[in-house]
Amino acid sequence: MRLDQNMMRELLKKSDAELWETIVAVGRAKGVQLPERPPGPTEMANLRAALGGASGRMSLAEALRIITQFGK
């Protein structure tokens, strides 16, 4: 799945629960099991910051680190 800036903006407009559902679905499609329960507000804010980036550029490495940490 390739994400362009427009798609990322649309994803980031979703609620935390909806965004997490999307992340879980993408992970499942790639063979990664994540908890169905979304992370807490702090983790979701960090994830949104990594995906949206202050400069408008996402940090997939940082987003993956956050998701992996939560999945443990």
Image (cartoon, rainbow, N blue to C red):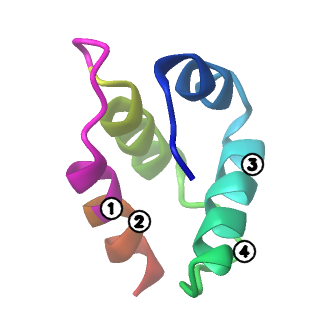
Disc 3 and disc 4: Cα gap in Å?
10 Å
Badge 3 or badge 1: first in the primary sequence: 3
Residue identifier under label 4: 36
Disc 4 and disc 1: Cα gap in Å?
16 Å
Q: Is residue 67 left or right of residue 53?
A: right
42 w.r.t. 26: above or below? above
Task: Point out the residue furthest to the top here.
Answer: 55
- What residue span does the magenta drawing correspond to? 54-64
Q: Residue 20: horizontal and vertical position, in percent? A: 66, 54
Disc 3 and disc 2: Cα gap in Å?
14 Å
Residue identifier under label 2: 67
User: Residue 5: within the magenta?
Assistant: no
| Residues marked 2 and 1 touching at CB (< 8 Å) | yes
Q: Residue at x 57, y 19 (%)?
A: 9
Residue 19 quadrant:
top right
Residue identifier under label 3: 17
Disc 2 and disc 1: Cα gap in Å?
5 Å
Q: Amino acid at mark 4?
A: Glu
| Residues marked 3 and 4 touching at CB (< 8 Å) | no
